[in-house]
Image (spheres, rainbow, N blue to C red):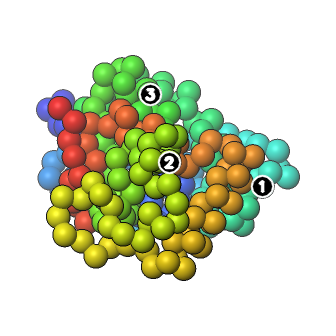
Amino acid sequence: MAGYIHVMMLPWSAFGHLIPFFNLSVALAKAGVRVSFVSTPRNIKRLPKVPPNIENLIDLLTFPLPILDKELLPEGCEATMDVPSEKIEYLKTAYDLLRNPVKQFISDQRPDWIFIDFISYWVAEIAQELKIPLLVYRVFSACQLAFMGHPESLVGDGHKRRRPSPESLTSPPEWGDFPSPVAYRSLEAIIKDFMNRMLLVSEILKGFINVFRHVKVLLYVAALNTKENTLIYVRR
């Protein structure tokens, strides 16, 4: 379709992510943007119907989910709703194996923009290699991202410096340049710190750590948007 802006959507395989990405696709198509929406066959079948007046602008593309050992990820489990919480890391492992077919699609189609979640950090690397602008659409609240802070504050020495203890979570973040009451209460901060440590150990054992996915994506992103359509920043 010559003359149309073409964007690619690649949401994480959870319906709390798929549906917002689908709704965004519909909104963009109504504005005359051509959308290639990529997910696995079973997830595509469970999406709402595309409105008839924009069917020609939204392509729902199925990429088979790579198969793992059935003990790790049973056949037909393509979304988080299909698996117990302890197997979600294996769903991420299978999802990461979509890297090569997705790269081939991007290389062939050369979309003008790519929209992703924080999970698919490897698309950020592909976008940088092929020099295609990347937009991260976060289905979480903008205030949550603001409280989390800049990527450098989430890992390594930056995290130790900015969030050195549970007590550091009980006051608004220092990087906010506006008054805010957002902070954890003491007990909440202790529980949050404990849960983060347990989650970190679990993710290290099972696969690529979520916070590292988030940071890696933001290193390459051209723009970051949230579910409230709050544009956090645009890299020029």
Q: In the drawing, what numbered circle is on residue 139?
A: none
The foreground one among 198 and 79 is 198
Real-space Cα separation, disc 1 to disc 2, in angstroms: 39 Å
For discs 1 and 3, the disc positioned in front in the rendered view:
3
Quadrant (top left/top right/bottom left/bottom right) for the C terminus: top left
Real-space Cα separation, disc 1 to disc 3, in angstroms: 29 Å
Image quadrant assignment for residue 220: top left
**Dot 2: element:** helix
Quadrant (top left/top right/bottom left/bottom right) for the N terminus: top left
Location of mark 3 (residue): 125
Q: Position of residue 210 (x, y in %)?
A: 55, 49
Q: In the drawing, what numbered circle is on residue 74?
A: 1
Q: Is residue 26 visible?
A: no
The foreground one among 63 and 116 is 116
Task: Say which label, 1 or 2, has the lower sequence index.
Answer: 1
Real-space Cα separation, disc 3 to disc 2, in angstroms: 27 Å
Residue drawn at the location 49% of the way across and 78% of the way down: 186
Image quadrant assignment for residue 84: bottom right
Task: Say which label, 3 or 2, has the lower sequence index.
Answer: 3
| Mark 1 closeness class: few <14, some 14–19, many ≥20 residues within 10 Å | some
| Mark 3 closeness class: few <14, some 14–19, many ≥20 residues within 10 Å | some
**Dot 3: element:** helix
Q: Amino acid at mark 1?
A: Pro
Image quadrant assignment for residue 147: bottom left
The foreground one among 45 and 168 is 168
Location of mark 2 (residue): 160
Q: Position of residue 138 (x, y in %)?
A: 36, 56
Residue drawn at the location 71% of the way across and 54% of the way down: 202
Q: Amino acid at mark 3?
A: Glu
Q: Is residue 220 visible?
A: yes
The foreground one among 30 and 79 is 79
Task: Tell me if 220 is positioned left or right of 93 in this view.
Answer: left
